Amino acid sequence: MSDAALDPAETLRVELGDRSYDIAVGGGLLAEAGARMAPVLRQKRAFVVTDATVAPLHLGRLTASLDAAGIRHDTHILPAGEATKSFAHLESLLDAMLAAKCERGTMIVALGGGVIGDITGFAASVLLRGVDFVQVPTTLLSQVDSSVGGKTGINTRHGKNLVGTFHQPRLVLIDTDTLTTLPRRELLAGYAEVVKYGLIDSPGFFAWLEETGAALIDGDTAARRRAILTSCAAKARVVQADEREGGVRALLNLGHTFGHALEAECGYGETLLHGEAVAVGMLMAFELSARMGLAPAADVERLRAHLAAVGLPVVPPRLEGRRMDADILVSHMASDKKVADGKVTFVLAHGIGRAFLCRDVDPAVLRGVVADFVA
Ligand code: NAD
Ligand code: MG
């Protein structure tokens, strides 16, 4: 566990047997990264991967802390953005790691958002048949979601995240100060995933977010830290119960079947960020639950009100002034990677904090919900 001298960070532990690891959350952790990493290093050597946006903002504090701890390091800067999760960039990254003579004991460090975490984790999992890595997430989305749980990967022309591995990090270091440079829109997109944890199984957390969400988004650091810790604890619980998504881990896809369909139509970019798609998608999942007689309509309205209050979208965007096509959206859902035997598994809810998996959604009711959202 963490050295008391390094507090005030709070530490959670993800219990996965010999793949267990700590998640440390607090302000100023980048400056302590070297000291905090020391216990999990096999040699005093690191290879740091980041992106061109994060590098000028945060890389210096990380490398200074490595220097202070006597950890030799190389750095590799990838372009920012989703397009970086490609075979071409994976190849260039692995090539740079080999050119730097990374060894089995070299610690790979991912400093950045989910894009950097995913491609770096993937590279670490295949370099020399697998080396250790540390996640240092710098977006709210990566701090509450992608840095925990060990999913890594890249995109292909067949779709997002279709090539990857399960490779757990050795440590997750969450410096909440990095959020001060994050654009508000990216912060909000990450916040949608925070709301998701409340909707899945924590009605009390959702109620707390209704009270505190606006302040959190406006910069309340104590609220941010509390929300990140609660979210990571929720994700850790699910990952501990189902590391490789054979069952309950699928609950984390709440809003994602709808969200992915919207993203596919919008082209995975600035039109609709992933978290924005998830916000609309969660609302669609609740609306579907209500129309199937499973959830109270009042809970749908509570969710809509909260998303709107913080500034998240509650309807899909118009594409160059045109509506999305309901049938195309439904067909995107049928090609989701979570489809089994041709059946889509939906995450529905009996109400706020009561999500469950459902394989028997009436196609007509589903189409009606989608059609009404794009109308
Ligand atoms: P991202 O990594 O693209 O970051 C968003 C933008 O913010 C980028 O332009 C980045 O350069 C910039 N940025 C990052 N940190 C910053 C900071 N502190 N200040 C200013 N700018 C900063 O995107 P993301 O939203 O963090 O992650 C999305 C990716 O995560 C997707 O590829 C998604 O598939 C993946 N993901 C993976 C998992 C998983 O379990 N592995 C879960 C959820 C999402
Ligand atoms: Mg997500």
Image (spheres, rainbow, N blue to C red):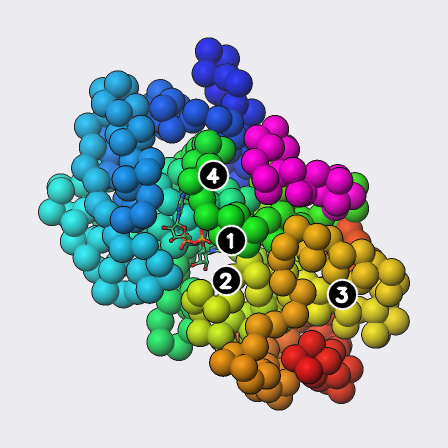
Q: Which residue is drawn at 44% across and 65% down?
A: 270
Q: Is 221 one of the magenta-colored residues?
A: yes
Tell me how many marks there are. Answer: 4
Under circle 4, the secondary element is helix
Q: Closer to the observer: label 4 or label 3?
A: 4
Packing grade of label 4 (10 A; few <14, some 14-19, many >=20) is: many
Residue labelled with disc 4: 179
Q: Are marks 2 and 3 in contact (CB under 8 Å)?
A: no
Which circle's residue, 4 or 1, is located before the other in the chain? 4
Q: How far apart are marks 4 and 1 (CA)?
A: 12 Å
Question: Can you tell which of label 2 and label 1 is closer to the viewer?
Answer: 1
Amino acid type, mark 4: Leu
Answer yes or no: do the residues labelled 2 and 1 have beta carbons within 8 Å?
Answer: yes
> Alpha carbon of mark 1 to alpha carbon of mark 3: how far?
24 Å
Real-space CA distance between mark 2 and mark 1, rounded to the nearest whole angstrom: 9 Å
Ligand 1 is within 8 Å of the C-beta of the residue at disc 2: yes
